[in-house]
Amino acid sequence: MNAESDTVRDTAGHAGGPGERPPAEVAVVVIGYDDAAHVTDAVRSALAQGPAVREVVAVDDCSKDGSAGLLERLSASEPRLKVIRRRANSGGCGTPRNTGLDAVTSPYVMFLDSDDVLPPGAVDALLAAAEGAHAEVVSGLCVRRELPSGRETPWQPRLYALHAVVPRPAQRTRLVHDTLCVNKLYRTAFLRAHGIRFPEGRFPYEDVVFTARVLAAAPRIALIPDRVYVWHVRRSQARLSISLDRSGVENWRARTEACRQAYEVLLGAGQKELARTARAKFLDHDLRMYVRELGLRDAAYRRAWWELTRAHLAEYDADDWARNPAAPGRLIGRVVLASPEPCDLPRLRELAARPARLYPPYARAADGTPVWSDAVPQVSLEPLRTRPVRALPLAVDAELRPGARGTRLRLRLHELYGRVAQAGPETVDVEWWHRDDGDVVVRGPRLTLAPCAGVSGADETADSAGHGSSVASVASAGSTGTWSAEAAVDLHALAAPGAGTWDLRLRIRFRDGASRDVTAHALTGAGLLRRRVVPSARHGVVLVQPYTTHSGALALRVAPGVRGVLSVVRARLRRLLH
């Protein structure tokens, strides 16, 4: 990587003097279809950016719900708003964005979807960086906001930790991972000079191809840590967005096609490293995301998905597979390629988790080489022998057990081809993270690991768990290949914020000071995931519902008090009736 791309530069200053108003140089293209409930909020968030926004071009893709009328009424009192109504629905997002781009008269342009918003100050921050760095493209932080909870997750935060200037995209290949088009400001003349447009018509994931076309033109890019886009995620609405509606295999077909075209665009422009990174991103992000959800689909979907994936991965060459061969996405891809029919879906789901978990059984070839399984021995796991302990896909089982001494958490760490014993696990930190507010963490005990030869499982450690002590015993069983632990769960602390969902996270610490953050596989035996009402001196009762996530990890729903219990019961009834 060129040193210049790693240099952090201040790009926050306007060209004008102190107190001067920024020039009106930015156009915001807002697209929408049948989104009357949200489109005016999106447009108003663009207009509220202030005088730097010269024009807002709202393109209605032939809506039938009155969206166009709402926009026309708004434009009557706002001279900066121009409304364009397409005569026929395009079936996608690319065509209306191109329509808006053609109508833009400003030096800079950015894009906004009708169900999202621009946060205050977004345009000023982007424009200042563009002018200060003489950049053709400026990219800022996008946050995904889950509604109605309001929980926010930053998108690709590693790219936006600091202000930086990247003279050429090849010097920061990580740029390929941010395939969004909406968290960026583009110099209009740059897009037009290179003929950069979105794919037309019904082309899901059009922004993947558009972003590849932008990077292929080798623009000077400025990166800023400012929040510039709020991506609203509404999972409960009747019509899901393209990125959320993954229930049909055609969605996966569209995604693989977009990724294929992105690769071809970058490779055709001579951007070989960016093209390679795009393929690696497909394995690490796209493939893992869909594998985590395969268990939710029927057999017909899984067969069609498997066939499409094998056809796509067959285009990869030896260099694609040779890079970081122990990475979870590459192992998953190699298993898919090696088997004509869907196989080992539960284990693949575990490996697709974040962090990855390589779940037993652990097989070896005749010569002792670690392999995926006896059924798929051609997929070697030899690279795991040299992978750092902090990056190993460690597998931990977890179960919750109620008892006279309260609810207890039982853990079991599996050996991994001798690497765990070699590293010497010493302690395990237990943490519960609130699903709706990631800043709320309930930290459990640090479990001290004590070797107990011959103990093989979590069930056999209960008697030595200290009877309510916050420090649990953990057994290391040389020949059995497991380490197990048990500790009490502080339901009072989990219930304190009210009803909510908690994700279990663990940090395993090793003899040399290394550590590995992991999640735990939820055991699903008889009664293990049953909902229970637990007596509580503080709340009267607490409803405890352990369950397994899409990636197979243990999570916990907690509802304190009679009122909380009744609210959960009512919600359950509504889901059943729906």
Image (tube, rainbow, N blue to C red):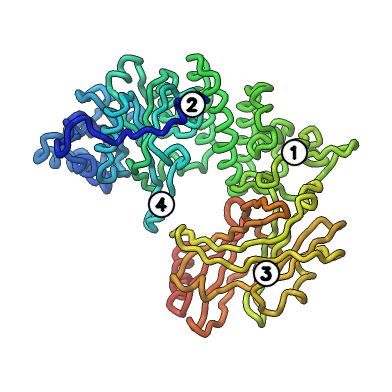
Q: Is residue 384 visible?
A: yes
Determine which quarter of the picture holds residue 168: top left
Label 4 vs label 3: CA separation?
34 Å
Three-letter amino acid code at the position of disc 3: Gly
Of marks 2 and 3, which one's residue comes earlier in the chain? 2
Of marks 4 and 3, which one's residue comes earlier in the chain? 4
Residue tagged by mark 2? 3
Label 2 vs label 1: CA separation?
29 Å
* Residue placed furthest toward the right: 366
Q: From the viewer's perspective, is the residue at label 1 or at label 4 nearer? A: 1
Residue tagged by mark 4? 152
Three-letter amino acid code at the position of disc 1: Thr
Instruction: State the residue at coordinates (42%, 19%).
Output: 218
Instruction: State the residue at coordinates (46%, 44%).
Output: 244
Residue tagged by mark 1? 386
Q: Secondary structure at mark 4?
A: strand
